[in-house]
Image (spheres, coloured by chain):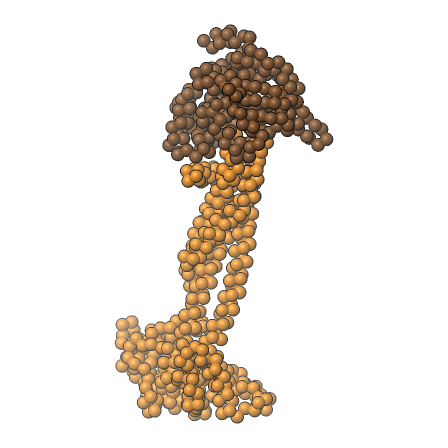
Amino acid sequence: MAALISCEDLWKIYRLGDVEVQALRGVDLLIEEGEFVAIMGASGSGKSTLMNILGCLDRPTKGCYRLQGVDVGGLRADQLAEIRNRRIGFVFQNFNLIPRTSALENVQLPLFYRGLPLRQQRALAAEALARVGLQGRENHYPSQLSGGQQQRVAIARALVASPSLLLADEPTGNLDTQSSLEIMAILDGLNKKQRITIVLVTHETDIAAYAEREVVMKDGRILTDRKTPSRASALSVEA
Amino acid sequence: MPTFLLLTALTAVRILGRNRLRTGLTMLGIVIGVGAVIAMVSIGEGAKAAVAERVASMGTNVILVLPGAVTTGGVRGGQGGVVTLTTADAVELKKRIPLLRETGWARRDVMQIVHGNKNWNGTVNGISPSYLTIRGWSFTGGGPLTQQDLDTAARVAVLGQTAVDNLFEPGEEPVGAIIRINHVPFRVVGTLAPKGQSAQGMDQDDVIFIPFSTAERKVFGTRFLGSVGALFASTERPEDLAPAVAQIREVLRQRHRLQPDQDDDFFIRTQVDIGKVHEDTSETLTIMLFSIASVSLLVGGIGIMNILLVSVTERTKEIGVRMAVGATRRHILIQFLVEAMTLSVLGGCLGILVGMLGARATTVVAGWPTIISPETVIAAFVFSVAVGLFFGLYPANKAAWMSPIDALRYE
Ligand SMILES: Nc1ncnc2c1ncn2[C@@H]1O[C@H](COP(=O)(O)OP(=O)(O)OP(=O)(O)O)[C@@H](O)[C@H]1O
Ligand SMILES: [Mg+2]
């Protein structure tokens, strides 16, 4: 079975005038369907850069990224948009909800671009909100929700389209411990119960402990890649 | 796609509704532009229609010959200032030019007219019976002057509407009544349907027609018997007008014994000439309107483009989010185009409304006739859509061609 994600020698080089920043310097990575991977590493080590490429939001300068066996580098912009729409859910550190637009409409967005009838959009979005424990908040604006609630809306938006891959770049970075635990419980459930592959960037070891695999980056390269040791103890906290 | 468009339009309205002041100010250019155009086109069309009506009220295929400049011993008389045309000229023209269906003549003067205790200074025209037919007058009561009236210099009169209004009580029957023109009693034999203003803006209904012979001998008092104020002729078909004019000129020059080096001592005018003046004016008006429309729509369009560029920049992050969840370039492009068009169409509709009110106000306040044709309204609407599309294209493209990651990272 082909890996869900397969990266070979990924490079990302930013040019700022004369200065060249090598954000990724030859990343090789294989992630199988159903895995829960945490990416860690110092600030500036290239985690977000890698995530954006994995999420088809950005293209590598060099190297090959295959998603479900398809070389993404050869696809047109609208084909990438479709992949983002159907196969990938993205959760950001700063939530990235559209302001002054209700929670329900934010969650509807992927379905809206998929061209589903409005009723179906509404029904599926309401269901997704319920799954993250936000029933009754459908008509709240982002500004009327707490950070943790906003992030749950973002997760609902990411999973409403039933993606096979969920990418979360520091999803708990702006949240307090309690909210962080709630978010992680949701993500853990998605991975365990719905077999959604999750790649998560975090700075915190207890968050990383939810994952079954821990990838550490340094200076645009993968430093270590191993099974999470403290997984069992982290789960006992949740229980 | 229809769902997408509908929802996009609703979103656009909501977004524009959030920022009412900004939306209003942005639309103002279009509102004023479209409003001005609608108002001015309706005034222009109203004026054009009025002119066309007045030109038509002259009668159909009419040639008018007026006495004109005579140069005798270096003295040049003004138009109508000198007696150069006579009833004999008219008779001769009819005899010699087969193209002419009819010829007639008239002379006019302002006289005091009395009926009962009413007293009025009106224009009295001494005419040949053919005059009324040539000028296309129709009757509301009684009948026309006859050849016999002319031959016997009968004291009979036909009244225009203004004359009737000024001499008779409302509901009073004018036909059969006796009026006094310059103390001479006349019997009213007919009343005329109103024609309104002339091409020169005179009240054409301010008239009383009496037989030419009667006018000459009993009312006006004339130095030269047979001299007329104007000759009229009509042709069967419009295309006969030009050759008929040439022949009239030929005959009159002969009869007036003008040498080849002498100027005409008369003027010839046709409806075509009179209509042309107005055509030229309305053409100038149209060009002016077109310039105003272009400039105001340009300004309005630039306003829309400007605010849309601001909006695209402000919402860069939102664009990134939309792209991240699967919006294609086309989706983003359409979203901003729809916003631009919502602005311009809303502005256009308001402009149409403002223009209609403006036209109405012009009619009420200044008394000018205005016409708002459906074509004008449709054209204005289509133009607004086009302006939105055209000026929205650049900002929308700018939004659509952002890279998802750069848009998302934008602060
Ligand atoms: N758009 C860009 N232009 C230029 N340089 C960039 C850009 N984005 C990232 N970089 C550089 O690439 C490197 C990796 O950045 P990246 O955002 O991937 O780090 P990170 O591991 O996510 O860090 P953090 O933990 O702080 O989020 C950094 O040195 C950063 O300065
Ligand atoms: Mg980062």
Tell me how many marks there are: 0
Q: Is residue A151 above or below residue A75?
A: above
Q: Estimate the x, y position of residue B224 in percent, counting from the top left.
A: 45, 92
Q: Residue at x 42, y 84 (%)?
A: B100
Chain in orange on the image: B
- The outermost residue toward the front is A1
Instruction: Classify A183 as above or below B149.
Output: above
Closer to us: A118 or B94? A118
Residue A53 relative to residue B186: left or right: right
Q: Is residue A213 above or below residue B329?
A: above
Q: Residue at x 50, y 26 (%)?
A: A88
Residue B122 occupies quadrant: bottom left
Left or right: residue A60 versus residue B343 is right
Where residue A48 appears, x then y in whole percent? Answer: 59, 23
Front-most of B189 and B242? B242
Q: Determine the image quadrant of residue B399.
A: top right
Chain A shade in the render: brown
